[in-house]
Amino acid sequence: MTLSYKELAGLLVDEELTANEPLHASFREKRRRGLDAAAEADVVMFGVPFDAGTYKRFGVQEGPMGIRRALEGFRTYSIELGIDFDDVLTVADIGNLDVQDWNSYTDTFENIGRVMRTLLADGRMPIMLGGDHSISYPAIRAFAEHHAKPIGLIWLDNHYDTMEPFRGDPLFCGCPLRNVITSLPELVRPRNVVHIGSRGFGNSASSARNARELGFHILTIGEMEERGVAATMRHAVELATDGTEAFYVTVDIDSADALYAPATQSPRPGGFTSRELMTLVREASLGGAAAADVVEVAPAIDLGGVTALLAAECVLEVIGGRAARAVNRG
């Protein structure tokens, strides 16, 4: 069920940032705010300050505001794409879900679905800011149900996220990819799901076994190095769009090397460089991603804000790729 924008207002809070006056025309000035702006925007951002899916509370519920603070310093022109996306499309930010109970999956997940379905039905591209990775499950479920035909899914993450219930919790942040595939077998087929970013000793043998049994595509960091960064994502897009209606991309910031993303639940070495992750996300958007999320940023433990800066770059690459596609179609 979709809601009107007036009804949606009851689920959201719009928190003001208190940044100093910027020195240049930045994304901050060009971003539209509120539901009235969303009704006219091409891309709509919303945050989900939620961390019930983590095994310890360490601050990812502050991720949406941390990413927004980082976004304030960026402009809207892309060197790689050669366009200013503000000339092509409009971006609205409708604030955060009003999470009343930090450990209630039920209310938060239902409201994520309501926001996603409303934005998609209105023809907007949603970008969700997390929050822990458990929130991707209801977002992708709503995305798939909206299209009502098979969708593709590209999952950038060090972890397979195929765990069985963790300490009795089936919605834990280590379970969402398993939950998506097993609960939506007709809409999310393993042959259209591509996982990129696993490396080293970050996954358990049982998660790896579950991933193999579920049957989705796994492209490791080593394979990406052999194939090339842009070529890897272009291959992933081919797999995700083979016989599907649309595809979704989710970015767990721990897919990046701990050097570039220290402020996350499970920072590990050997991941994407910041440049590689930017390229991957840009190529996914250029390939036609219709919705996206960026999750697992914990500003309170960040070092110089580098993790939030990288997450902000990922958001901008999604928007920039969308704009470039619009230009090319034009």
Image (tube, rainbow, N blue to C red):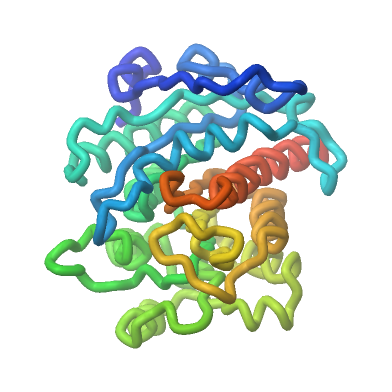
Image-quadrant location for residue 234: bottom right
Residue 186 seen in render: yes
Left/right placement of residue 40 relative to residue 184 reads: right
Image-quadrant location for residue 212: bottom left
Reply above or below: 224 against 134. Answer: below
Left/right placement of residue 94 relative to residue 131 reads: right
Residue 330 seen in render: no
Q: Where, quadrant-wise, is the C terminus in this rendering?
A: top right
Reply above or below: 77 against 95. Answer: below
Left/right placement of residue 268 relative to residue 174 reads: right
Q: Nearer the viewer, residue 237 or 249?
A: 249
Say which residue appears at 65% left-offset and 17% top-offset: 21
Reply above or below: 158 against 128. Answer: below
Q: Where, quadrant-wise, is the N terminus in this rendering?
A: top left
Q: Nearer the viewer, residue 145 or 127?
A: 127
Q: Position of residue 309 (x, y in %)?
A: 61, 45
Left/right placement of residue 244 relative to residue 238 reads: left
Q: How many marks?
A: 0
Q: Position of residue 222 (x, y in %)?
A: 64, 82
Q: Position of residue 68 (x, y in %)?
A: 53, 33
Say which residue appears at 27% left-offset and 42% top-offset: 109
Say which residue appears at 69% left-offset and 21% top-offset: 22
Q: Nearer the viewer, residue 196 or 187?
A: 196
